[in-house]
Image (cartoon, rainbow, N blue to C red):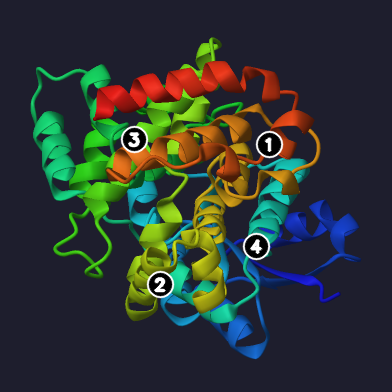
Amino acid sequence: MTKLRVLFVDDEVAILEGLRNLLRKERNRWDMAFASSGAQALAEIEKARVDVIVSDMRMPGMDGATLLARVKAEYPSVARLILSGHAEQEAVLRALPVAHQFLSKPCDASVLRSAIERTHRVSALLDDDGIRSIIGRLERLPSVPSTYLELTRAAADPKRSIADLAKIVETDPAMCVKVLQLVNSSYFGLAQRIGSVRHAVAYMGLESLKGLVLSANVFAAMESQPTPHFSLERLQESSLHAARIARRLFSDARKADEAFTAALVHDIGKIVLALGFREEFERVAVDAQVSGRPVHLVEKEILGVDHCEAGAYLLGMWGLPFGIVETVAFHHTPSLISDGPRDILAAVHVADVLGDSACYGEPPIDSGSALDLKFLEGAGIAGDLPEWTAIAEEESRRAA
């Protein structure tokens, strides 16, 4: 098996030596390279393949944000991390479009190792360099224009509260993803990862959210639909409907919020594929509609990757909690997860299956044939299915 190749970049030689010593135990598994400038880093990447680059933010000449912007443009499949002792909001916002994850100095070996392994593990979801390159070039996901405008107006209104903004963010998968990306970065220094949009917005504060929206312009509106058979509004409606169902399947508030978030972004990969493979994705939509086959199977046949894998890859690279990434990756194939906590995955799987027909205005489907009953039984949740089905039907009536 080819070793993971990691490139560390810092203008302080002592820092590089410290990293070399800190990660000495990884030499049998990783091929590590070290560069003391942006120029040296680019030369190192040109010389040999690099899987992950970990760069300091502040460096003379070419700083970390500039370096990662170059790497993103020229080597988009490389996972990009910032490891910096400086986390001013302006610096974070500059790096946000080009860095997948943020880590703070000093960084514990286990934290650094986990972050690097995480990006590598998620990248293994896709083994096609072309697909990785397309996803690597995306610096932002589109948001529905009306939602974008609503958040912009609310952020500029001093009378609107954090709770008001959270409600707006919760209606849009792309906004949800970027807010979670930032709040889970080292800029906020939280002890544990946050999977709830409401908690994320509360931690960020109004000014940070305004800066994210207005300064970085992350939530750029989509000018037109990428293909005739793809509707961003329709996707948002479906995702929000599934999220509302998933939230109601838990009495525990923390799990309810995590299930809501995971369901809200579970189909985010469709946006990635629609933007990256416009003509092919149009063929997918037409073929699935004519044949009646599940979209994710047609995607795999035509594109070689489905929206579950594409969405999970992107969210993992952006640093979202692994539980959400895993749920996105396997919401159509939950039986591939055979042990460990599976209640969030089960909730999103059920919400997705039971909520689809009502959301798309299609004839009722035999949901039992689409539900993975073997998985639900193995997860000890099959007994909850009648109650969950009743909840999904009630939410569908509300959405009708």
For the residue marked with disc 4, what is the amino acid? Leu
48 above or below 90?
Answer: below
Secondary structure category for the residue under label 3: helix
What label sits on residue 240 in the rendered view?
3
Residue 327 percent coordinates (x, y)? 59, 42
Which one is closest to the eye, mark 4 or mark 3?
3
Write down the quadrant of residue 134 in the picture: bottom left
Neighbours of disc 3 within 10 Å: few (<14), some (14-19), many (20+): many
Neighbours of disc 1 within 10 Å: few (<14), some (14-19), many (20+): some
What label sits on residue 125 in the rendered view?
4
Task: Tell me if I can see residue 66 in this picture.
Answer: no
Residue annotated with mark 2: 287
Q: CA distance from mark 1 to mark 2?
A: 27 Å
Secondary structure category for the residue under label 2: helix
For the residue marked with disc 3, what is the amino acid? Leu
For marks 4 and 3 on the same chain, the one whose residue lies earlier in the sequence: 4
Q: Nearer the viewer, residue 336 or 389?
A: 389
Label tally: 4
Neighbours of disc 2 within 10 Å: few (<14), some (14-19), many (20+): some
Q: CA distance from mark 4 to mark 3?
A: 26 Å
For marks 1 and 3 on the same chain, the one whose residue lies earlier in the sequence: 3
Quadrant where the image shows the C terminus? top left
Q: CA distance from mark 3 to mark 2?
A: 25 Å
